[in-house]
Amino acid sequence: MSEIQNTTDREGEQHITVSVGKQLFGIPVERVQDVFMPHSITRVPLAPPEIGGVLNLRGRIVTALDIRGRLGMPSGGTQRLAVGIESSGESYGLMIDEVGDVLTLAPENFGPLPDTLDAKWRAISRSVYHLQDNLIVVLDVDRLLSIGAASKA
């Protein structure tokens, strides 16, 4: 993550960067409650494949969302961190490999989703952001959390 420069001195949208596999994603900061290490995830029988299970986080039941499964990425990653998200009164932990920096993304570097982007990815992404040496896929958290939407895309 050393190639990413914090750009908080410019106007723009603040995003936390996370990695899943070798892909860099951006999540709007205002949607993030916390970042934590899940210790014990309990599988849920008959749950969709993108549901990794549930966990207890400080007395709250949190649904663990397997980002790899949601995006159709191969399993076997090192998802050892989770980004805590609240939506419609429910708590979610987005399972990720690494957390990066909080960046203020300048509006002029946002771009539309490429036509070649996989349909599962398009279904849960808002835009892409061009860094000097990398590309951030900016996630649409509400669409990401609508389980089943990616498989219908």
Image (cartoon, grey):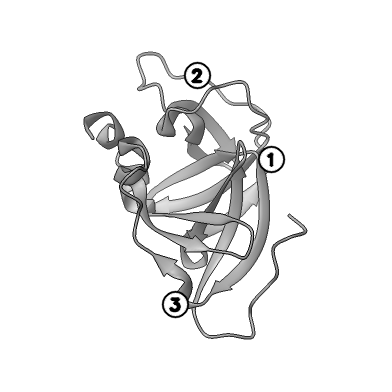
The residue drawn where x is 60% and y is 50% is 18
The residue drawn where x is 45% and y is 46% is 91
Mark 2: amino acid: Arg
Q: In the displayed structure, would residue 20 be above or below residue 48? A: below
In this rendering, would 40 be left or right of 92?
A: right
Quadrant in which residue 149 is drawn:
top left
Residue receiving disc 1: 37
Q: Nearer the viewer, mark 3 or mark 2?
A: 3
Q: Are there few (<14), some (14-19), or many (20+) residues within 10 Å of tag 2?
A: few
Q: CA distance from mark 3 to mark 2?
A: 40 Å
Q: Nearer the viewer, residue 125 or 118?
A: 118
Answer whether labels 3 and 2 touch (C-beta < 8 Å): no
**Mark 2 / mark 1, whichever is N-terminal:** 1
Please state the horizontal and vertical placement of residue 14, each as a whole percent of the image: 53, 72
Answer whether labels 1 and 3 touch (C-beta < 8 Å): no
Please state the horizontal and vertical placement of residue 130, each as a whole percent of the image: 52, 63
Q: CA distance from mark 2 to mark 1?
A: 17 Å
Determine which of the numbered discs, if any, sits on residue 107 in the image. 3
Q: CA distance from mark 1 to mark 3?
A: 32 Å
Quadrant in which residue 75 is drawn:
top right
Please state the horizontal and vertical placement of residue 53, each as a whole percent of the image: 49, 26
The residue drawn where x is 53% and y is 23% is 74
Mark 3: amino acid: Pro
The residue drawn where x is 52% and y is 57% is 26
Determine which of the numbered discs, if any, sits on residue 113 in the image. none
Determine which of the numbered discs, if any, sits on residue 43 in the image. 2
Please state the horizontal and vertical placement of residue 137, each as a whole percent of the image: 47, 53
In this rendering, would 57 be left or right of 69?
A: right
Mark 1: amino acid: Met
